[in-house]
Image (tube, rainbow, N blue to C red):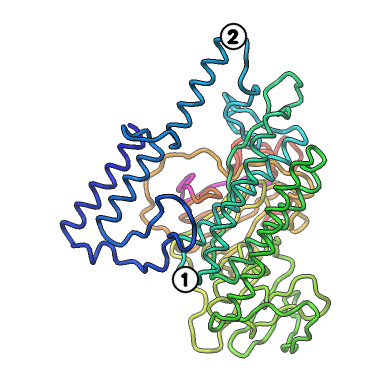
Amino acid sequence: MSPGHLYRGIRAGLEALVATWGEAKVFCGDPRLQVGPDTLMMNGLSAITDLASAQRALDTIVTQGEGAADHDDRSHYGRYVALRDELSRLLAINPAFAPAHAAARNPVMRRPIDTEDRVWIQREPAATLLDAGNAIYALMLRALGGLFGHAITDVTTRAALVDGAIDAMHALASVATYLPRLPATDDDDGPRAGLTFTMSRMPETFPDAPRGLRMLAESARAIAATLTRVAIPLDARFERARDLVATMGARFDEQAAREAKSAPGVAAPPPATAVATTPPTEVVDGVEIVQGERLEIRFEAARCIHSRHCVLETPEVFLANVVGPWIHPDNAPIDRLVHVARTCPSGAITYTRKDGGADEDVPPVNLIRVRERGPLAFSADLQIAGEAPRLRATLCRCGASKRKPFCDGSHNLIGFDASGEPPTTPTEPLAVRGGPLVVEPLQDGPLRVRGPMEVVSGTGRTINRLNQAKLCRCGGSSNKPFCDGTHARNGFKADGT
């Protein structure tokens, strides 16, 4: 099946929908949310407002990219044909001509579970440059996600997202063409490196425009710093890629400030030097309790794993890197604060509403997320031995935490290497998916978990469905996240219930 078949299927589907429901119901979206010539100058780009314009757009896609009978030489297909013909001519002149580096087939960025037909890119500087390339790729996709997945109508914001995505493509090309020059492994004669197009294993959403743009800006700054440190010493031509990404970050920051000023109910983050009104705060049993007018925020530092949802999504509330009071609940709409609290994987942030709104509900489905090279993130009506009931927690699976059974970030210090994407075990749906989930740390052994649970990967794929399980917490199981008895052989020590 060719891509042309796909687009013909889309065309037929649109025609069937219009015949059934009419154009007004099928093409009902806000035209301001489309990317047209007013946002991006691209040959053949036009707004889709009815069946005829949709059909023209599909014809353009097929003609320009997929080798239609009436394609021109500038189409993707035409360019590939020209490359093929040029290679044939060069090989006729010199049969020994090699058109490419011995690039890795099926390269991966992390140690693979199944090493057959996969090349783990582990040698420096290829590994760090690959990581930067994948970060650029993720930045590009998140910019496009913000553009197409959210109701952003401001023309300059949309233009910034489009320009950022295109600039990221150019920066990514620099990394992609240089990686095949670098050894992928310790074998100098082995395969060269290559892009893996790996996205973050944590589902990072694009919130409203100001916060989403600030997230993109922070990513761009981090990437630019890595290119400066790693890529430019390899080849000065990386300066252009660095400048593209750095300029993109500045543009996103500028646009975030502009959006924050115009968005109703969304406050711009206060300057680092601003003096904010100090809300009433007390510390009880290690929990920082901050009183806002409409919401009480509680922060338990001992449970925090620094996933940074709070400081990225509401930087005007959770002030990073300041001395003194750092939580200001009245600086953002209450619904945004509630969302941030509920997405805190460790449960370090909790809240109580004072405006009559509902507090956090028990999750309808008990989930255990396997975090890449990190802990197990529980979301359930948790009953952890010796602890007060809670709805979220991150529990150690590297064996090194000093706050067992909870994670304290030690996996980062010891270089814990465990996939967040274990293989799937086919299972039937559970008859009951919620309810109490009892977690018992066994003496010098695993976590015994009883109750309905769905174990999912970092990307949300269901790994297993069970009503009881023993989960590894010594870090040594060959069947992670499940226990295989290794704790009895590696001398693992931990308190039990």
Relative height, residue 171 to residue 122 (above, below): below
Question: Closer to the camera, 284 or 411?
Answer: 411
Relative height, residue 245 to residue 427 (above, below): below
Residue carrying label 1: 153
Q: What stretch is highlighted in magenta?
A: 461-473
Question: Closer to the camera, 34 or 21?
Answer: 34
Q: Do the residues labelled 1 and 2 touch (CB within 8 Å)?
A: no
Q: Position of residue 380 (x, y in %)?
A: 52, 63
Q: Is the magenta stretch mostly helix, strand or loop?
A: strand
Relative height, residue 337 to residue 468 (above, below): below
Q: What element carries label 2?
A: loop
The magenta stretch spans residue 376: no
Mark 2 surroundings within 10 Å by alpha-carbon count, few (fewer than 14), some (14 through 19), many (20 or more): few
Q: Residue 95 carries which label?
A: 2
Give the image quarter of residue 163.
bottom right
Give the image quarter of residue 299.
bottom right
Q: What element carries label 1?
A: loop
Q: Is residue 448 visible?
A: no
Q: Residue at x 43, y 64 (%)?
A: 364
Relative height, residue 360 to residue 162 (above, below): below
**Amino acid residing under circle 2:** Pro
Q: Nearer the viewer, mark 1 or mark 2?
A: 2
Q: Which residue is drawn at 30% across and 37% down?
A: 5
Q: In this view, does 100 lie to the left or right of 74?
A: right
CA gap, disc 1 to disc 2? 56 Å
Mark 1 surroundings within 10 Å by alpha-carbon count, few (fewer than 14), some (14 through 19), many (20 or more): some
